[in-house]
Image (spheres, rainbow, N blue to C red):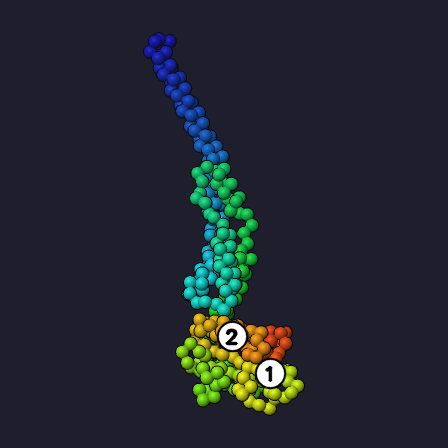
Amino acid sequence: MDATTDEVVEKRQNARRIRYAVGVGVIVIAAIATCTYLFAIAPHNRAVSAFESSAAQVRDKNSALQEEIDAAQHALDAGEAPLDVGTQDALTVAIANARLSLRVIPDMPSSTSDIEAAVESLNQPLDYSANSQALQETKAAFKKSVRQLRQVTAPSQDFVISRLGQVSDVSDIQAATEEKDPNKSLNKAGSYTAAVFFHYNNLSDPDGLYSGKPSIDNGTDGGGCIEVFRTVEDANKRNDYLAVFDGASIINPGSHKVVGTVVIRASHLLTASQQDALTAEIEAGLTAVD
């Protein structure tokens, strides 16, 4: 074999070595790529997909609760006062608790392990039913109380007479007029715009001082009276004035309570428990809403 032949053989062998090396290299690269996909890219993609799915579920639940929070806050932001301030406080607390309960959805982490940890956290049980119920109940109570205050804010004389007529053991309901008003105060500045007198059938009257007489002639002593004022300030002033005579032997105003712009009065001849029961029943009648 001459030198030329040897060179040809050598070149062929070198070519085979190169092809083999390239083949091995391709296989190694393919193996690395496969391993990278199987053990890095695929798990990362699965983690990303799981994160997005879990975040979407939490986001949907958060959105539903947020709608209820917004509705409750809207009721407060309307600026209407309730008869019972406690209902406003309760709604405010329910809104605050609901906001605090909203699960935070974090930004997606970069590493697969951190994403998987975030998914596990997002997948923890999430139940807003207690918050939802609290919002619904406190909002309903607040809105009812708003309607109640509206109802006892400068109500009409006819409304008072209608509601008083539904109170048990109340009879002979008579409204004061400018011509016939025991206090001569009807429609005067700062005074009541309506005064509705009534007889209470359970009043102890052994001497017959009040039976058989018109309730307006008996005044508050024969049962009681509902006085209506234009403003809360006027009603409170009247209540404070009556309080000056509490316990007086000659001029005793009986019990008196402000409800909205109304002063509910019950005869001093009734026992304390009778006064409380009668006042509570009248208040319930005036504030009853559909």
Q: Position of residue 93 (x, y in %)?
A: 51, 57
Q: CA distance from mark 2 to mark 1?
A: 20 Å
Crowdedness near tag 2: few (<14), some (14–19) or many (≥20) residues, C-alpha within 10 Å? some
In the picture of the structure, the residue carrying the numbered disc 1 is: 200
Residue at horizontal 50 percent and vertical 37 percent from the top: 113
Residue farthest along the left direction in this orientation: 4
**Which numbered circle lies on residue 119?**
none
Apparent side of residue 14 relative to residue 126 in the rendered image (left or right): left
Crowdedness near tag 1: few (<14), some (14–19) or many (≥20) residues, C-alpha within 10 Å? many
Q: Secondary structure at mark 1?
A: strand
**Relative to the observer, which residue lies in front, 208 or 60?**
208
**Relative to the observer, which residue lies in front, 168 or 103?**
168
**Which numbered circle lies on residue 242?**
2
Q: Position of residue 233 (x, y in %)?
A: 44, 71
Apparent side of residue 239 relative to residue 206 in the rendered image (left or right): left
Residue at horizontal 46 percent and vertical 84 percent from the top: 184
Q: Is residue 262 above or below residue 63?
A: below
Query: Mark 2 belongs to which amino acid?
Result: Leu
Quadrant location, the N terminus: top left
The mark lying in front, picked from 2 and 1, is 2
Does label 2 or label 1 sit earlier along the sequence? 1
